C-alpha cells in the first residue's frame, strides 16, 4: 500500500479529529448507521473530502466520518459506511478506516456488517460476535512492499478479534436484552452473491456467516496493533440454505427493521469500552 495516501488523508481531516485522541472507533456497515444518532457530533467530514478515500457508492453506507462524544464523555470515531473492494477501490480506500483509527491514536476498532447466515440455526435478525474469519481469496491488503507502519511483514493472525472486547459485546447484549452468538465470518469478494455450492463448502470449512467486507479492515487493524471486535447482523440466509433467491434490497430492508436493536447494542458497547 502507498503510505503517502494515508498521510494525505490524515492531513486533510479537520483539526478536531487530529486533536481528539478518541478511545474507540466504529466502522458501521449496512443497517448499523443509526447506532450513534443520539450522540453529540463534535466534528464531521464526508468521505469525499478525505484525500484518497472517496464517496461511498453502496446503498446503506452514508459515507461520513464523525467525531462524537461518548456516553461517558471522551470522544469516539464513527465511520458511517465503508468502501468495498468490489466497488473498484484500491486497498488504501478499503482499509482507510483502520489506518486512520491507528493514526489518530485510537486503540480500539469495532467493525460491523450485514451478512448471510450459513449455520442452519441462525435466522435473519440474529447478531453474531465474530471470533475468527476465513479469507479464502488470495486478495490481501498486505500485498506489496513491506512498510513497518502496517506492522511486521508476516503479522500473526491468531487473535485478530480481541477476546476481551468480545466479552464486552456479550455483556452489552445481556444488558440490552439482545441475545448474541459467536461465529466465524468468511469473506466473499462480491458483488455477486455466493452460489449454493460455495455456501456448502464454506459451511464445511467452519464458516457461520458470509459477507463482502470486514476481513481486510480487521487484518490491517490487527497488524497495526489495534484491538479489534466484530459484529455481523444476519440480514438473510445464504444461498441454498432455505432455497430462496437473494435480493440486495431485502438485505437493506431487514437491517433497517432491526436498526434500533443494533443501535442499543453499539451504544452500550461504547459505554462499557469507556470504563
Image: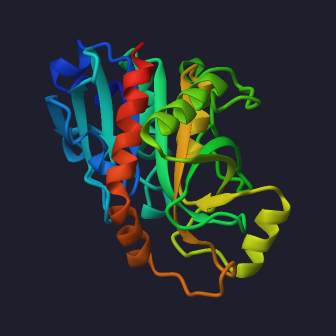
Check the image and name the residue furthest to the right. 204
Q: For this rendering, which residue is in front, 176 or 143?
A: 176
Q: Where is residue 166 in the image (x, y as percent from the top left)?
A: 60, 31
Q: Is residue 19 visible?
A: yes
Q: For this rendering, which residue is in front, 179 or 222?
A: 179
Q: How many marks?
A: 0
Q: Is residue 120 left or right of residue 32?
A: right
Q: Where is residue 86 in the image (x, y as percent from the top left)?
A: 49, 63
Q: In this view, does 158 lie to the left or right of 219?
A: right
| Looking at the image, residue 38 lies above or below residue 202 | above
| Looking at the image, residue 158 lies above or below residue 32 | above
Instruction: Name the image quarter holding residue 161.
Output: top right
Q: Where is residue 77 in the image (x, y as percent from the top left)?
A: 31, 29
Residue at (72, 64) in percent of width and height: 119
Residue at (35, 18) in percent of width and height: 104
Q: For this rendering, which residue is in front, 47 or 171?
A: 171
Q: Position of residue 195 (x, y in %)?
A: 68, 79
Q: Is residue 181 left or right of residue 113?
A: right
Residue at (25, 15) in percent of width and height: 73
Amino acid at each position: 500500500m502507498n503510505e503517502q495516501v494515508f498521510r494525505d488523508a490524515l492531513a486533510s481531516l479537520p483539526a478536531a479529529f487530529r486533536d481528539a485522541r478518541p478511545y474507540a472507533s466504529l466502522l458501521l456497515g449496512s443497517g448499523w448507521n443509526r447506532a450513534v444518532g443520539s450522540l453529540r457530533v463534535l466534528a464531521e467530514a464526508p468521505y469525499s473530502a478525505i484525500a484518497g478515500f472517496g464517496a461511498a457508492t453502496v446503498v446503506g453506507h452514508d459515507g461520513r466520518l464523525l467525531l462524537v462524544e461518548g456516553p461517558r464523555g471522551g470522544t469516539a470515531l464513527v465511520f458511517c459506511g465503508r468502501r468495498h473492494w468490489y466497488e473498484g477501490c484500491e486497498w488504501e480506500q478499503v482499509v482507510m478506516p483502520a489506518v486512520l483509527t491507528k493514526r489518530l491514536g485510537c486503540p480500539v476498532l469495532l467493525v460491523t456488517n450485514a451478512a448471510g447466515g450459513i449455520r442452519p440455526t441462525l435466522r435473519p435478525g440474529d447478531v453474531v460476535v465474530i471470533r475468527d474469519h476465513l479469507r479464502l481469496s488470495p486478495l490481501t491488503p498486505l500485498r506489496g512492499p513491506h512498510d513497518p507502519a502496517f506492522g511486521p511483514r508476516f503479522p500473526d493472525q491468531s487473535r485478530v478479534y480481541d477476546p476481551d472486547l468480545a466479552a464486552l459485546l456479550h455483556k452489552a447484549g445481556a444488558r440490552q436484552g439482545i441475545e448474541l452468538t459467536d461465529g466465524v465470518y468468511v469473506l466473499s469478494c462480491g458483488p455477486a452473491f455466493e452460489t449454493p455450492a460455495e455456501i456448502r463448502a464454506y459451511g464445511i470449512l467452519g464458516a457461520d456467516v458470509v459477507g463482502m467486507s470486514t476481513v481486510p479492515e480487521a487484518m490491517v487493524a490487527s497488524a497495526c496493533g489495534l484491538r479489534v471486535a466484530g459484529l455481523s447482523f444476519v440480514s438473510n440466509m445464504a444461498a441454498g440454505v432455505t432455497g430462496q433467491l437473494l435480493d440486495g434490497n431485502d438485505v437493506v430492508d431487514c437491517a433497517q427493521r432491526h436498526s434500533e436493536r443494533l443501535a442499543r447494542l453499539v451504544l452500550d458497547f461504547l459505554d462499557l469500552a469507556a470504563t
